Amino acid sequence: MKNEKSKFLVPQCLSALAPFKKSAFTLAEVLITLAIIGVVAAMTIPTLIANYEKKLSVVRFQKAYAEIIQAVKLAEAEYGSMNTWTFGNASPDDMLASTKYFFENYLKIKTNKSCFPVSEECWATTYTIDGLPSFKSTMSQPSGYSAVMTKSGYTIFSQIGQGNHNIVIDTNGKNKPNKLGKDVFLLIFDTDKQYVGVTHRSKHYDSEEERIEARDKYCSSECESNGSIGHWCGISCGAVIFDNNWKIPENYPW
C-alpha cells in the first residue's frame, strides 16, 4: 500500500517543477508595431505642433491687443479723448519726437528697451507670410520709425502720422518666425475718429458696420500667400483672426 501511494506522489511533484508555457511577441511583430507607430506619429505630430503654434499665436496676439487697448483707455482718462491728442507734423524728426512722447505719456506700457529711431536692438527683420523680407528695408530708412520692447514680451514697431498712428506688433518679440500673419500683426490708431483696432492696413472706417462690410474685400487680399501686394502680404491677417472671434479659420494661410 505504501509503494502504491508513492507511485502517484513522484509524478505529481515532477509536474509541478515543469516550466510554464509563456506567450511573447516575436522580434518581427515588435518591429512592425514600431514602424506603424512611427508612421502615425509622422503624420499627426506636425499637425498637432501647427495647431499648438496657431493657438499660442492667437493667445499672444489677444494679450498684446488687450494691453494696448487698456493703455489707451487709461490715457484717455488722464489726457482726454483721443481726438484731442497731438503728435506733431509729418517731418521725420517730429515723428520720432511725437512717437516717443506717445509711448511715454499716452501709451504707458512698461518697456525693457526703446529704440528711437528703430534698430535691430528692438525689432527683428520681419517677413511676409510667404517668407519674403518685409520690414528689412525700413531698418535702412529709420527716419520717423521707432520700436519698443515691452516687459510683456511683445515688441511694437510704429510711426506716428497726423491724425493716425499705425503700429505693428510682434507678439513674441524678436523670436522667430517674425512673419506677418503668424506672430506679426497690425493695429490702427485713428485718433480723429477715436478708433483703435484691427483692420485693413490703409482703411479707416466711420463705423464698425462699414469695417465689416469692407472686410472681405480688403482683408482677404492681404491675408493670402502669393499675394500681389509684395512686402505687405499677410499684414491684414490680424483682422481675419479678430473677425473670427479670435480664432484662426480653416482657410488661413498658415
Image (tube, rainbow, N blue to C red):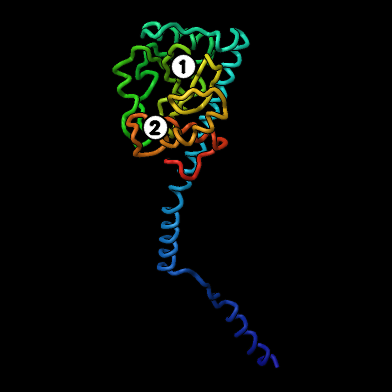
Vertical placement of residue 122 versus 1, above or below: above
Vertical side of 192 occupied by 19: above or below = below
Front tag of 1 and 2: 1
Choose top left, top right, bottom left or bottom right for residue 229.
top left
The label shown at residue 8 is none
Q: Residue at x 43, y 26 (%)?
A: 201
Image location (x, y in percent) of residue 3: 66, 91
Give the Cα distance between marks 1 and 2: 21 Å
Residue 145 in view in this figure? yes
**In front of the other: 102 or 201:** 201
Q: Residue at x 30, y 22 (%)?
A: 137
Q: Nearer the viewer, residue 224 or 143?
A: 224
Q: Quadrant of the N terminus?
A: bottom right
Q: Position of residue 121 (x, y in %)?
A: 37, 18
- Image quadrant occupied by the C terminus: top left
Q: Residue at x 37, y 39 (%)?
A: 225
Left or right: 176 in relation to 150: left
Question: Which residue matches tag 1?
Answer: 165
Amino acid at the residue labelled 1: His
Name the residue beneath numbered marker 2: 179
Q: Is residue 172 visible?
A: no
Element at label 2: loop
User: For mark 1, does the 10 Å Cα neighbourhood hold few (<14), some (14 to 19), or many (20 or more) residues?
Assistant: some
Residue 46 in the image, given as x and y percentages of width and height: 43, 47
Q: Residue at x 42, y 20 (%)?
A: 157
Q: Residues within 10 Å of mark 2 (few under 14, many from 20)?
A: many
Q: Nearer the viewer, residue 186 or 163?
A: 163
Q: Are marks 1 and 2 in contact (CB under 8 Å)?
A: no
Label 1: element kind: strand
Q: Tag 2: residue type?
A: Lys
Q: Position of residue 163 (x, y in %)?
A: 48, 13
